[in-house]
Image (cartoon, rainbow, N blue to C red):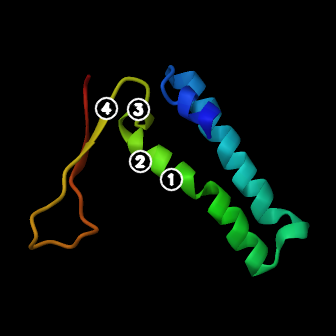
Amino acid sequence: LRETSIALQDNYEIRYTAISVIKNLLIKHAFDTRYQHKNQQAKIAQLYLPFVGLLLENIQRLAGRDTLYSCAAMPNSTSRDEFPCGFTSP
């Protein structure tokens, strides 16, 4: 996670590679026959839980090469799942 955190501060190619490595590890763990029991899968998921926070902290850097990702919550009258999100130039 420390290395991924550092990579997320770098340029697009480095960020993309770091996310790809983590994604591939998640996939390998999900399909590894040694870890198919639900308890084992839950323990593996707990290992990756801090990664979710790391992604949320760096959401603006993950949108793409030349854009920043911006989201704002809708007023209370709408569902909590509805967020107006768009891309803006830096």
* Label 2 Cα neighbours within 10 Å, binned few <14 / some 14-19 / many ≥20: few
Identify which residue, 8 or 82, lies in the foreground: 8
Left or right side of 47 for 78 = left
- At label 3, counting other C-alpha atoms closer than 10 Å, the crowd grade (few under 14, some 14-19, many 20 or more) is many
The amino acid type of the residue labelled 4 equals Leu
- The numbered mark at residue 56 is 2
Amino acid type at circle 3 is Arg
Residue 34 in the image: x percent, y percent?
Answer: 90, 68
- Secondary element under disc 2, as helix, strand or loop, is helix
Question: Which residue is outermost to the right?
Answer: 34
Q: Is there CB contact under 8 Å for labels 1 and 2?
A: yes
Q: Residue furthest top?
A: 11
Query: Do residues under tags 3 and 1 come within 8 Å of each other at their CB atoms?
Result: no
> Residue visible at 63% across and 63% down?
46
Q: Amino acid at mark 1?
A: Val
What separation in Å lies between label 4 and label 2 (alpha carbons)?
Answer: 14 Å
The CA distance from mark 1 to mark 2 is 6 Å
Task: Specify the quadrant that holds the N terminus.
Answer: top right
Frontmost residue, 84 versus 30: 30
The circle drawn on residue 52 is 1
Q: Earlier in the sequence, mark 3 or mark 1?
A: 1
Secondary structure of the residue carrying numbered label 1: helix
Choose between 50 and 14: the one closer to the eye. 50
Q: Is residue 2 above or below residue 84?
A: above
Dot 3 or dot 2, earlier in sequence: 2
Q: Point out which mark residue 68 bears.
A: 4
Q: Position of residue 29 (x, y in %)?
A: 78, 59
Q: Nearer the viewer, mark 1 or mark 4?
A: 1
